[in-house]
Amino acid sequence: MRFDRRTAVITGGAIGFGRAFARALVAEGASVVIADVDVEMAERTAAELVDAGGKAIAVDCDVADPDRVDAAVATTIERFGGIDIVINNAGLHLMKYNQPFGVLSRNEIRSLFNVNVMGVINVTLACRDSMRDRGGGVVLNISSMAGYLSATPYAVSKLTVRGLTVAFATELAPDRIRVNTVVPGWVMTERQVKLWLDPEGERQIQENQCLKEKLYPPDIARMVLFLAAEDSRLCTAQNFVVDAGWT
């Protein structure tokens, strides 16, 4: 299997994209760490993966808190020996943050950037030494097509993630660590369907996507598997958009 004897840390791994990534990686032999602020849900997801024959643990991790990130990384190394793959998936993304800057309070904007931007920085730097010591690794940052299409605080945070990808790809290249961005379109996660999939959402999909098919988390997971594997060994500092042609 492609990821046998490799360990992946997935932030925000308890539900949605993160859970899809975990399932896909475990199916390919990886040991997976579900790092999430929702420890109860993270434990459920990890238990599901273990019941299916995989190797997985749940760890408490608030990506905005460097101390909690360091603790999560230490637990990962103690349990699995090191880190090979990091997926920076945790993020604030409810419609609350997809409004003009003037609508949100400064504290709300600060909270958004602490998670969506500083979270990527905190986790990447905390995992760097372990990946370097194991001969290299892969960092995948999860952005959003909103970073191409709007100018809200949420969209700007996801635009910034693409900038971090280029910066870290340059800085970590001597450590043989590749860094890329996955940019999902409108994906049918449980939360997305519950909050936004109404007749207007269906109409937008039909009008704006070149391919008139709904996207599901496993569609994004397939791109994650490609970028985490040796198949993409010369890909770094790039943005890989999976949006059925919307952008």
Image (cartoon, rainbow, N blue to C red):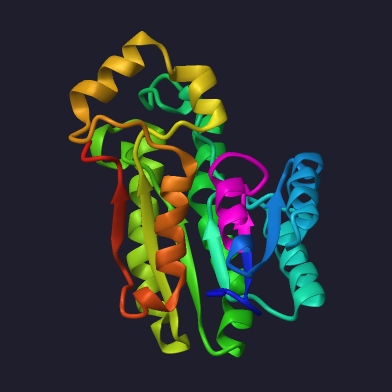
Question: Is residue 36 rendered to the left or right of residue 24?
Answer: right
Question: Is residue 186 rendered to the left or right of residue 91?
Answer: left
Give the residue at x 28% y 33%. Answer: 151
Is residue 161 one of those drawn in magenta? no
Query: The N terminus lies in which quarter of the figure?
Result: bottom right
Where does the image place residue 64, in percent across and percent down from the top left? 63, 50
Judge by depth and name the residue closer to the eye, 235 or 2.
Answer: 2
Query: The C terminus lies in which quarter of the figure?
Result: top left
Is residue 20 one of those drawn in magenta? yes
Give the residue at x 74% y 40%. Answer: 38
Give the residue at x 53% y 50%. Answer: 89
Where does the image place residue 31, in percent across and percent down from the top left? 69, 68
Judge by depth and name the residue closer to the eye, 232 or 171.
Answer: 232
Judge by depth and name the residue closer to the eye, 192 or 4.
Answer: 4
Choose top left, top right, bottom left or bottom right for residue 126.
bottom right
Give the residue at x 68% y 44%. Answer: 14
Is residue 155 shown above or below 87? above
Q: How many marks?
A: 0
Is residue 46 shown above or below 167? above
Choose top left, top right, bottom left or bottom right for residue 122.
bottom right
Q: Which residues are magenta?
A: 10-25
> Magenta stretch: dominant SS?
helix
